[in-house]
Amino acid sequence: MTKSVLGSALAAMFLMPAANAAVRFSDAIDGLYADAAHAGRGWVVDYIAKPNGDGILYLYGAAYDQTGKQVWVTTNFDVKEFEFKKTGVPMAMPNGGRFDDNWPNAVQTNIVGTMDVELTACGELKIALKPNAATGLPNSTQTLVASGDYVASAGIPTVNDRCVQKRKFTACPTGSTPVASAERTCQITGTIASNMTLTNETTWVLKGLVKVGTDNANKVNLTIEPGTLITGSGQAADYLYVEPGSKIFANGTPYAPIIFTSPLDGVPGGQPKAGDWGGIVVSGNAPNNKCLTAPFDCRSEFDPTLRYGGNNAHDNSGVLAYIQSRYAGYIFTTGREVNSFTFQSVGDGTVAHHLQAYRGKDDGFEFFGGTVNVKHAVVTEGGDDGLDWDEGYSGHIQYVLLQNGTGFGEDNGIEASNQNANQDALPRAIPSVANLTMIGNGQGGYGVYLKEGTGGHIKNSVFVGFKKGCQYMANAPTFAAAGTPTALTGTLTIDHVAYACDPQFGQDATAPWTSEAFFNAQAGNLKGDPALQGYLPKAGSPLIDGGAQNTTEAWFTPTSYIGAFRDQNDDWTRGWTYNVAR
């Protein structure tokens, strides 16, 4: 069938309510739908997604006159990402042409009334037909259910397993309150004092600081279902804080990521911006070089009443998987910020993978000590550093894409520190990171900024287009930790890394040797055009075979290429991320 049934000029006729709900239109609801009350009647539902998360919904079906005679009607309309219903959309009746081609016999239509359309859960739509009086057709309502199997526990049919919102919203559970101005929306504030699940048929609103548990005293599990939508309240300082000893189980999926975002995101008339809400903070009991002994009293830079730190490198704070954090990064004062993702002394018993920071006001990911490992991370158009570590962080990170964007104030690709107050503090920050693709787009500071005594290992990575340079080294303890270009200590290494910046290198006045000499002394490093198409390597790129497998650290997936992507067919960002420009 043709999808050019109604012209774009009809968009001005639409009524645009500010709906915001976790269950939402997507191509997972495509298919044939039956009228639950009338055998032999049904509709075709087809959703076309746009790159920005919005889409167009197409409906084809029938109205019925007083004698039961069917009259074919159709509609299509724009849908904002988080809308679940539309009212007053134009309803059209075909009056010529064919459905099998666009030219020269495309379907012709007349506007014959309006429709209301509401998605109540996976596989269930409610429509209200309101024909013009001249048609002689009566008003009618239909509950449409998808053809296919039913979900036994809920009694609601599902189109396929990619649509995860299988329950209808009923009421806000204990521990939350209804939001009067928004349907299917519940607010949480204060401390979550007992185990709680944020279900995906509800939009959840964080108001102010929302703590999970109480610092090892009251250990609480917070579970978040795939496809759940969580927003700030509009106060900006809204953020989720998982206390040491408590856990978060936020298991999204590739087709149903969990989304934390601005209350202005994905709704008609909304203009979200960086810093509309705080971010996600996870705190644990892993080592930190600022608080080495009991009571392990490290304090959050953004709120000194919040403690973290311990001596358990394998501490487990739960699971974070397939999560988007959009428009986060509240800045209380200079140097006191909440990032899109903040990990404070989080242990390597925690699972973290497929995480995106989109247009955050501060860092994409910051690690204050700890040992947590992260795979598959994306930072898109952030306001500060892509990756930032200090306080003795010693985890592993593999597969990272950073894309800077014009006008978003990005700083460095990596800002690597040991500790500001005591730059030789032990345990020294010695993380291992591999397979990074960091694209500065002529913006920001340095690709890699090594300072304040940091150690670490950067391998199989590419840095392109950072305004100040690809690599900068600062502070005497950093140079001492590295050794010399002819006698490297192994505490700080950069190998099989490609740089393409102008200028390439820099160092501060404490430098006993140049940053470039350090880079040149190590194996497999490249300078010059990496031959990227967007963020993927072109055929023949020196990156494709330029890496070296890590055979000493079992956590890493072995790779022999430089960058986050093996080739043009290896784009692991597809499907679960938001607005990643290829």
Image (cartoon, grey):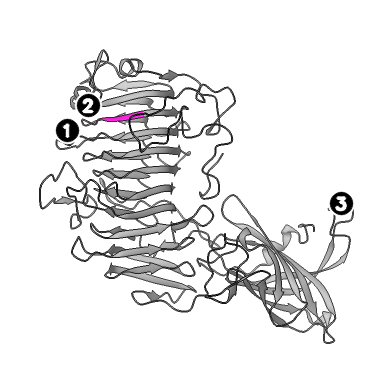
The numbered mark at residue 103 is 3
Where is 542 relative to 379, above or below? above
- Quarter of the view holding residue 399: top left
Q: First in sequence: mark 2 or mark 1?
A: 1
| Tag 2 residue | 478
Q: Secondary structure at mark 2?
A: helix
Q: First in sequence: mark 3 or mark 2?
A: 3
Question: Can the viewer see residue 117 in this picture?
Answer: yes
Q: Residue visible at 73% across and 70% down?
A: 43
| Tag 1 residue | 423
The mark total stands at: 3
Q: What is the magenta segment's predominant secondary structure? A: strand
Q: First in sequence: mark 3 or mark 1?
A: 3
The numbered mark at residue 40 is none
Whether the residues at callouts 3 and 1 have beta carbons within 8 Å, the answer is: no
Dividing the image into 4 quarters, which one contains the C terminus? top right
Crowding around mark 1 (Cα neighbors within 10 Å: few <14, some 14 to 19, many 20+) is: many
Give me the C-alpha separation between circle 2 and circle 1.
8 Å
Estimate the x, y position of residue 116 in percent, counting from the top left: 66, 74
Q: Secondary structure at mark 3?
A: loop
Q: Amino acid at mark 3?
A: Trp
Residue 416 forms part of the magenta stretch = no
Q: Residue furthest bottom?
A: 66
Where is 138 relative to 4, above or below? below
Magenta extent: 454-458
Give me the C-alpha separation between circle 3 and circle 2.
68 Å
In the image, taking residue 427 as reference, residue 400 lies left or right, namely right
Q: Nearer the viewer, mark 3 or mark 2?
A: 2
